[in-house]
Amino acid sequence: MQTTIIKVALSTSTYALIAERAKAEGVEPAHYCSILLTDYFLNGSKNVPSNSAAKKYVPPINDIETIDVPRKLPSTIEQIFSVCHHVWREKMEFADALRKVAQKFKVGETTVRDKCTRRISLPHSQIDTDRFVQMLNQPNSLRDYLCHRFPKFSGQIIQRFESVTPPNFEAN
């Protein structure tokens, strides 16, 4: 699945509601919006109401308060890339890659395993160790999943995957 990043202007009250619901789901507000929009258009109505939101008043851009999104990749993504590097480039087994990444980041192996599983799970798509290892054998699938899970970092995820995925990758 390819992703495209868009900016959405929301009222402060709407953003507060989304932030509250996103927190309850354990995801970032941007990701929560992505899930809502995807579900709406894939499972809900495909018809735009005749009183289209696009026809309603949109305030001038200088009246819209924007929130700058930090561009530093979350440690979850950094550690997953490190695991991928060790598995794909250094031909390590997953367990050995976990150990190496844990040493590099000065965390426990269970922390790295957690970031490869629970931390990237979605409410409707739980990732366990077997599923993560399966995705390791399908780099494009893992890349697309991470882009969906972390939409505001999808551009960086795609770039990093290009640098870490070996050419002509073949699963073991």
Image (cartoon, rainbow, N blue to C red):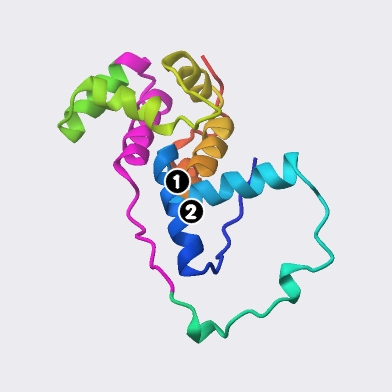
**Mark identifier at residue 22:** 1
Residue kind at label 2, given as amino acid type: Ile
Label tally: 2
Per the model, the C-alpha gap separating discs 1 and 2 is 6 Å
Residue 72 among magenta residues: yes
Q: Which residues are magenta?
A: 66-95
As drawn, 31 above or below 123: below
Instruction: Kindly indicate the quadrant of the structure image that contains residue 90.
Output: top left
Residue 128: x %, y % from top left: 44, 18
Residue kind at label 1, given as amino acid type: Ala
In this rendered view, identify the residue nearer to me: 53 or 150: 53
Residue 102 among magenta residues: no
In this rendered view, identify the residue nearer to me: 27 or 101: 27
Instruction: Kindly indicate the quadrant of the structure image that contains residue 5.
Output: bottom right
| Residue drawn where x is 50% and y is 18% of the image | 131
Residue 121: x %, y % from top left: 46, 29
Residue 97: x %, y % from top left: 31, 22
Horizontally, residue 110 falls left or right of residue 69, namely left
Horizontally, residue 119 falls left or right of residue 42, namely left
Number of other residues with Cα within 10 Å of mark 1, as a class: few under 14, some 14 to 19, many 20 or more: some
Q: Tell me the quadrant of the picture where the N terminus can be found.
A: top right
Asked if disc 1 and disc 2 are in contact, CB closer than 8 Å, the reply is yes
**Mark identifier at residue 18:** 2
In this rendered view, identify the residue nearer to me: 127 or 123: 123
